[in-house]
Image: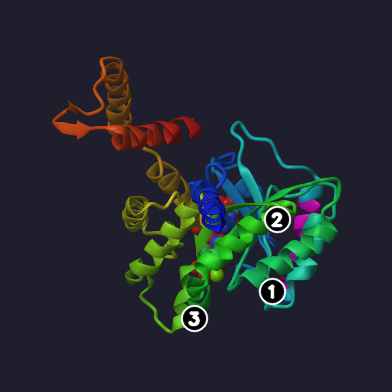
Amino acid sequence: MFRAIAVRFLSKQAVSKVPERNYIPRRALMYVPGDDYKKINKAFGLDVDCIALDCEDGVALNKKDARSNIRAVLDQGKPQKKKNYDFGVRVNSIESGLCHQDLESCLTGRNLPDTVLFPKVEEGDHLKWFADEIRHLIKNNGKINLIIYIETARAFINLNEICKTAMQLSKRFNFIPSALVFGSDDFCANIGQRIHWKFCMHGKKLVLVAKAYNLQAIDMVYIEYKDLDGLKLQCEQGMRMGYTGKQVIHPGQVPVVQEAFLPTKYQIEWAEGLLKSFEEHQKSGKGAFSYRGSMIDMPTMKQAQNIMKLANLAE
Ligand SMILES: CC(C)(COP(=O)(O)OP(=O)(O)OC[C@H]1O[C@@H](n2cnc3c(N)ncnc32)[C@H](O)[C@@H]1OP(=O)(O)O)[C@@H](O)C(=O)NCCC(=O)NCCSC(=O)C[C@](C)(O)C(=O)O
Ligand SMILES: [Mg+2]
């Protein structure tokens, strides 16, 4: 009997799936220092998927009152643009001692940001702290998206536990885990190494764990912001690894990144043709068939669907 119960329990576990959630594209995640009104206004005029007003490292220590600016911007209401976009606030880390004030300021006014970007998360307990904070601050059943920053060696060691805790807490608290960000600059500082693009192993681990939890994976900042060719190359490398977007720090980087994280015309044409052909072959009872010289079956069809989903979302 115990065996029967155990088998039933295990099979229930085996089929439990990470839930699908509404997908907000974040191809370019653009930082704007929260103390700089000029840059904030400029950002609202850009065609960018995600704007993150920053309280953290883009703001000098003697300007940490940036949170009041951000509160004022939020109170005016999210500026509407032709296309919807994600409007977030990056707060300071727990370790800084400033996080509580930042959260209090950005979550208690007239309007909530869409998303809170939470830096230097190192263990599940950091998320428990976060969940407890926002439980007291957010009123009227409000809900925010959460973007989690992985930027230290400890965070990489605890990555699975961090994501698991985020998923569990999100069932009881008012946030939706949405993405993992690779904070490569802090990671380099943390491990005492400078040439960060060599750390592909960690970048790949982040993508893998993000996918396992149905989260977006957002790639490192390219700080040589005038080198657009280098940026394009790094976008392509990241996209091939499975990243869904990239952090940017300057308006000039935005179009390159927005474009790079879209399927090309060739990929769209390939996917459309494949899906049509797949449907026809299914009707005639063929699970596997040949298309433009390659063997196609269910997994390739799903890849084509992914391409079309991405192409449609960004329209
Ligand atoms: C690099 C800087 C200093 C060059 O700033 P600049 O003013 O010298 O540049 P510019 O070329 O003269 O700027 C041209 C125009 O763009 C505007 N502009 C320029 N940047 C922005 C911006 N971000 N948002 C909105 N507008 C911006 C600027 O105001 C100007 O506007 P104008 O034509 O009307 O006069 C400037 O671009 C900047 O401050 N960028 C943001 C830096 C930042 O936020 N850093 C922190 C995020 S990265 C990070 O934290 C790491 C991570 C993830 O945590 C980890 O890997 O660990
Ligand atoms: Mg950082």
Magenta highlight on residue 66:
yes
**How are the colours assigned in the image?**
rainbow
Among all residues in the image, which is located at the extreme front?
1
Q: What is the quadrant of residue 163 in the picture?
A: bottom right
Q: Which quadrant contains ligand 2? A: bottom right
Q: Which mark is residue 190?
A: 3
Whole-percent x, y for residue 102 in the image = 76, 65
Q: Which mark is residue 112?
A: none
Disc 3 or 1, which lies upstream in sequence?
Answer: 1
Over which residues does the magenta segment extend? 63-73
Q: For mark 1, what is the residue? A: 94
Residue type indicated by callout 2: Tyr
Q: Which mark is residue 37?
A: 2
Question: Which of the pair 173/74 is nearer the observer?
Answer: 173
Q: Secondary structure at mark 3?
A: helix
Q: Which quarter shows the N terminus?
A: bottom right
Residue type indicated by callout 1: Ile
